[in-house]
Image (cartoon, rainbow, N blue to C red):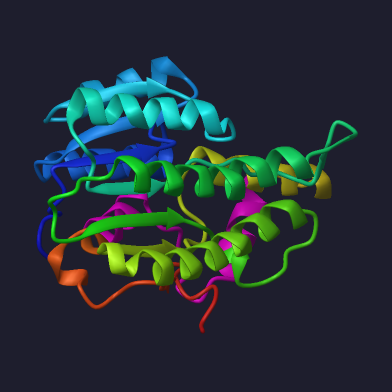
Amino acid sequence: MSDPSPRVAIVTGAGSGIGRAIALRLSRSGTTVALLGRTAGTLEAVAAECPGPARCLTVDVADRAGVEAAFDRVRDELGAPGALVANAGIGGPDVQDGVDRWDAVVRTNLDGAYFCARGFERVMEAEADWRHVVVISSCVARFGVPGIAAYSAAKAGQLGLVRSLAAELAPKRVRVNAICPGWVDTGMAEDRMRDIARGQDRPYEEVRAELLATVPLARISSPDEIAGLVAFLVSPDAAPFTGQAFDPNDGAWMG
């Protein structure tokens, strides 16, 4: 694998977990990173860890006008971006505290990815040989899981979005790919495991061990491993790939 080539990259959901790891990996490789998320404090903490230039912009990806304004600021303040990592998302059950969450989950995960991709297309670097969009989907785009229909549907929708955009944007020299992680050691994964444990009235540690035991490699991925795959996909080594979904899931789904 070679280092990523984009001079400027936008990473959404950059304040924690996978997004944080991606931002740090790109920054270490010499890319100027625009860190987008909803909470200024967490973004600023990540920016302080970045060895290279980093700019924090607070935005909710479910707000299309806000996304467009943030992407305009990236272009104006850092230069036109050569890569977008659409990582921002929310998980959790379909119904929480008696409230159906379909609209919020689909709006953030699926609509948000679309808004960001279109925003990137509008402001992306003109002179680069190739530009890159990487969408962080999920292994639940591949199979059904009870109780998270909204999240599964939104993540599956992201794969259709990636394939369509890859075909549409190839003439503009834009490669579009998706990553479908399994369990990754993040706060979101812990929250989901704790939801399951509460629903079954069982200890969290017991449920976590049982869930990981169902994975062929019996392990949980690290955010850095996902970041490494992103670094590959925005590098020259990934030249043959567009419209693809990559599955770093420790064997949870084998296609």
Residue in view at x 41 percent, y 58 percent = 221
State left or right for residue 19 relative to residue 51. right
Residue in view at x 40 percent, y 15 percent = 41
The answer to if 228 sits in the magenta stretch is yes
Residues in magenta, as a range: 204-231
Question: Is 214 drawn above or below residue 130 in the view shown?
Answer: below
Question: Is 254 drawn above or below residue 140 in the view shown?
Answer: below
Residue in view at x 13 percent, y 60 percent = 129
State left or right for residue 192 relative to residue 238. right
The image position of residue 38, as x and y in percent, is: 50, 24
Location of residue 134 (image quadrant): bottom left
> In terms of depth relative to the viewer, which is nearer, 213 or 145?
145
| Dominant secondary-structure state across the stretch colored magenta | helix
Extreme-top residue of the structure: 41
What quarter of the picture does the N terminus occupy? bottom left
Question: Is 2 drawn above or below residue 106 in the view shown?
Answer: below
